[in-house]
């Protein structure tokens, strides 16, 4: 026979559900609350250290009075840990973030009630996903594109040589030493030695290149520039004047690039540009496809998932821009969150829409496709220990990889159903 009767059953009730938020109540019978409150009080008594009493010997009334707030929290936490998971199962709620207790109601001799708020997935009924209009753009590997890529390679492999006794011109690179002052007072840490100034760059400090024009090696000059929007005086000494020398487009240059002849280099570049063009075309079509899908399916999204997506996007952007050399400031992070939030919301929307479409269209990933993806990943690495790591990742992240393959198949399905206009 159980400790409590049938009337002592814990009750769950869905209070409201809207967008991606559900609120439900948990009602714990008074008998259970009183029993747990007493047990909690006894546990606190064993640990309590109160003036005039040895540990574990303080009167229960004194312990109750001294720790009343903590006792209440402990009892609520106990029932939350015990019954919230049960409530989620009974009410068929699938949380995407940890539940939060919002209200607690407890009167002596009466059942305890507390409300729980939880974020849940949106209810998705995808529509208008067949026949999405796409505009296909192509980026062929033209002679002009190959020539432009060759010039980029030449620029990347250029060298700087001393420009003899020439005066500084607009195409030179100038090595300078400088100190800075404002209002006659030196600026702390505003000095440099051996700094390289590109006279053709628009990124150079405003006023500096104009001030350097015509100077010769060894000459010094005070130049007024704009720093932080304020007039600043730079005392500059020209140490060297250099000219950029581009390598000749010949067989030697091709060999430096790992090929035998210039024609082979051009052919290789044409191949690379063609592949890049195809990838760009596919990327743009995928973006249009998602945009068309989102246009008709503006489903709500859980805020916590949007926040997680934002953090992921900002971390990736930080790695791209700063590498491991620093972090965005708190102000920059907040500004980026505001700017990127619509994009993050759309990415979360797509993450719910694609599985819903796959379920409706009965798109599944058989074991053979998962195995093929594993073999493809194994072929991309050579070392045995790396192959072992790939196998382990596929085992540990099986559901995630299956989801990725399912989404890929769903996008292929949508692409096949789309209306594509070619150029």
Image: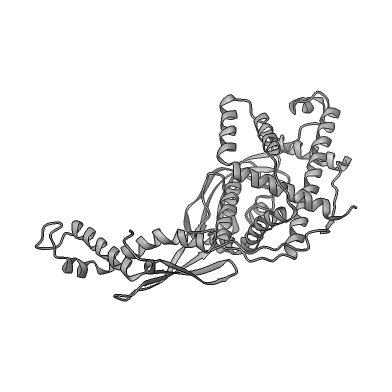
Q: Nearer the viewer, residue 149 or 413?
A: 413
Tell me, yes or no, if residue 285 can be seen here.
Answer: no
44 with respect to 305 (left or right): left
Residue placed farthest to the top in the image?
260
Q: Is residue 380 above or below residue 235?
A: above
23 with respect to 129 (left or right): left
Q: Position of residue 212 (x, y in %)?
A: 65, 50
Q: Where does the N terminus fall, quadrant-wise?
A: bottom left
Q: Nearer the viewer, residue 173 or 40?
A: 40
User: What residue is at 61 percent from the left and 47 percent from the top?
Assistant: 320
Residue placed farthest to the front in the image?
1
Total count of labels: 0
Q: Position of residue 128 (x, y in %)?
A: 78, 63
Q: Position of residue 396 (x, y in %)?
A: 55, 39
Tell me, yes or no, if residue 391 can be seen here.
Answer: yes
User: What residue is at 60 percent from the left and 25 percent from the top?
Assistant: 383
Residue placed farthest to the right in the image?
423
């Amino acid at each position: 026979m159980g400790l409590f009767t049938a009337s002592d059953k814990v009750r769950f009730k869905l209070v409201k559900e809207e967008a991606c938020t559900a609120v439900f109540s948990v009602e714990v019978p008074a008998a259970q609350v009183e029993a747990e409150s007493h047990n909690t009080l006894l546990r606190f008594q064993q640990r309590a250290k109160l003036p005039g009493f040895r540990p574990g010997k303080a009167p229960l009334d004194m312990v109750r009075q001294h720790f009343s707030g903590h006792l209440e929290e402990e009892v609520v936490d106990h029932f939350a840990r015990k019954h919230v998971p049960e409530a989620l199962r009974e009410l068929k709620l699938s949380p995407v973030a940890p539940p939060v207790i919002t209200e607690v109601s407890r009167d002596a001799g009466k059942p305890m009630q507390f409300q729980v708020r939880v974020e849940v997935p949106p209810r998705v009924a995808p529509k208008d996903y067949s026949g999405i209009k796409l505009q296909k753009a192509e980026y062929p590997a033209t002679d002009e594109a190959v020539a432009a890529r060759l010039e980029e390679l030449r620029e990347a492999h250029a060298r700087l040589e001393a420009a003899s006794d020439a005066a500084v011109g607009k195409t030179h690179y100038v090595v300078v030493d400088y100190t800075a002052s404002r209002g006659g007072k030196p600026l702390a840490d505003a000095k440099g030695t051996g700094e390289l100034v590109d006279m053709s760059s628009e990124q150079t400090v405003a006023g500096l290149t104009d001030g350097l024009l015509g100077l010769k090696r060894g000459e010094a000059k005070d130049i007024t520039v704009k720093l932080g929007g304020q007039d600043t005086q730079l005392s500059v000494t020209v140490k060297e004047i250099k000219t950029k020398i581009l390598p000749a487009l010949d067989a030697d240059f091709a060999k430096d690039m790992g090929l035998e002849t210039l024609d082979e280099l051009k052919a290789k570049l044409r191949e690379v540009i063609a592949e890049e063009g195809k990838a760009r075309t596919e990327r743009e079509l995928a973006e249009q496809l998602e945009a068309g899908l989102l246009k008709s399916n503006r489903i709500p999204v859980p805020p916590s998932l949007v926040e997680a997506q934002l953090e992921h996007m900002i971390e990736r952007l930080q790695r791209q821009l700063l590498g491991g050399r620093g972090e965005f400031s708190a102000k920059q992070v907040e500004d980026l969150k505001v700017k990127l939030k619509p994009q993050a919301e759309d990415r979360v929307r797509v993450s719910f829409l694609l599985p819903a479409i796959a379920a409706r269209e009965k798109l599944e990933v058989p074991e053979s496709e998962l195995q093929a993806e594993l073999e493809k990943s194994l072929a991309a690495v050579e070392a045995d220990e790396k192959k072992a790591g790939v196998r382990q990742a596929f085992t540990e992240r099986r559901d995630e990889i299956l989801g990725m393959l399912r989404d890929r198949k769903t996008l292929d399905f949508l692409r096949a159903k789309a209306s594509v206009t070619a150029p």
